[in-house]
Image (cartoon, rainbow, N blue to C red):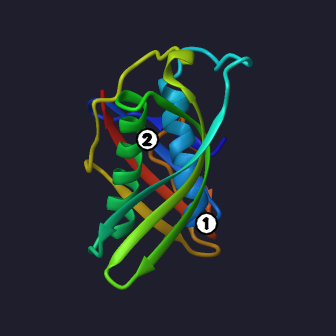
């Protein structure tokens, strides 16, 4: 696991680490889904596959906004389409003035999932998606979250619950 719940003044925060930006988005997604689960997904649940895509226009914080949009899409697919994301493989591209994320996802029907909490929104409070260079150390201000040494990527995201 490469995601850790971290304290915030309100709601719940998540810090994730990974070797690449795409892997970071996958780890953050897995961390969010793990946080929501009350119990494991039953082994008899039928798994489906799909491709989910999100796009944003170029922006000063394109990585952060793309992460928020992606996580909101995962929540939307569960709540509205009844598709609970089990895992995913992500590809991120920038073409002209658009950043796009394409995810090959494995999902189960949401009726197969017992959730412990509900996330109302993915916020931009304390939002961070950044690269950590080789030999750079990212110290953690929280005892429950380890220090990270680059090279790699990290994210901080806060969920409104």
Residue 132, x across and y down, in percent: 54, 69
Disc number for residue 142: none
Q: Residue at x 51, y 61 (%)?
A: 102
Q: Residue at x 27, y 74 (%)?
A: 60
Q: Nearer the viewer, mark 2 or mark 1?
A: 2
Q: Quadrant of residue 100?
A: bottom left
* Element under disc 2: helix
Q: Nearer the viewer, residue 135 or 89?
A: 89
Left or right for 143, reference 44:
left
Q: Quadrant of residue 144?
A: top right
Residue 57, x across and y down, in percent: 28, 72
Left or right for 147, reference 96:
right
Q: Which residue is mark 2?
A: 74
Residue 158, x across and y down, in percent: 34, 41
Outermost residue toward the right in this view: 43
Q: Is residue 143 above or below residue 155?
A: above
Q: Residue at x 25, y 48 (%)?
A: 125
Q: What is the CA distance from the residue labelled 2 to the residue labelled 1? A: 20 Å
Residue 142, x across and y down, in percent: 47, 40
Q: Which residue is mark 1?
A: 20
Q: Earlier in the sequence, mark 2 or mark 1?
A: 1
Left or right for 143, reference 76:
right
């Amino acid at each position: 696991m490469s995601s850790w719940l971290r304290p915030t003044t309100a709601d719940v925060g998540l810090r994730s680490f990974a070797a690449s930006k795409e892997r970071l988005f996958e780890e953050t997604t897995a961390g969010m889904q793990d946080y929501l689960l009350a119990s494991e997904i039953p082994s008899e649940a039928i798994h489906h596959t799909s491709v989910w895509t999100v796009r944003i226009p170029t922006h000063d914080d394109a990585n952060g906004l793309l992460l928020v949009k992606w996580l909101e899409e995962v929540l939307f697919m569960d709540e509205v389409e009844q598709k609970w994301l089990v895992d995913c493989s992500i590809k991120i591209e920038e073409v002209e003035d658009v950043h796009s994320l394409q995810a090959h996802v494995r999902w189960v029907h949401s009726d197969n999932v017992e959730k412990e909490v509900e996330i109302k929104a993915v916020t931009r409070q304390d939002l961070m998606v950044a690269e950590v260079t080789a030999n750079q150390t990212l110290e953690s201000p929280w005892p429950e979250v380890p220090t990270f040494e680059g090279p790699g990527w990290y994210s901080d995201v806060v969920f409104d619950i």
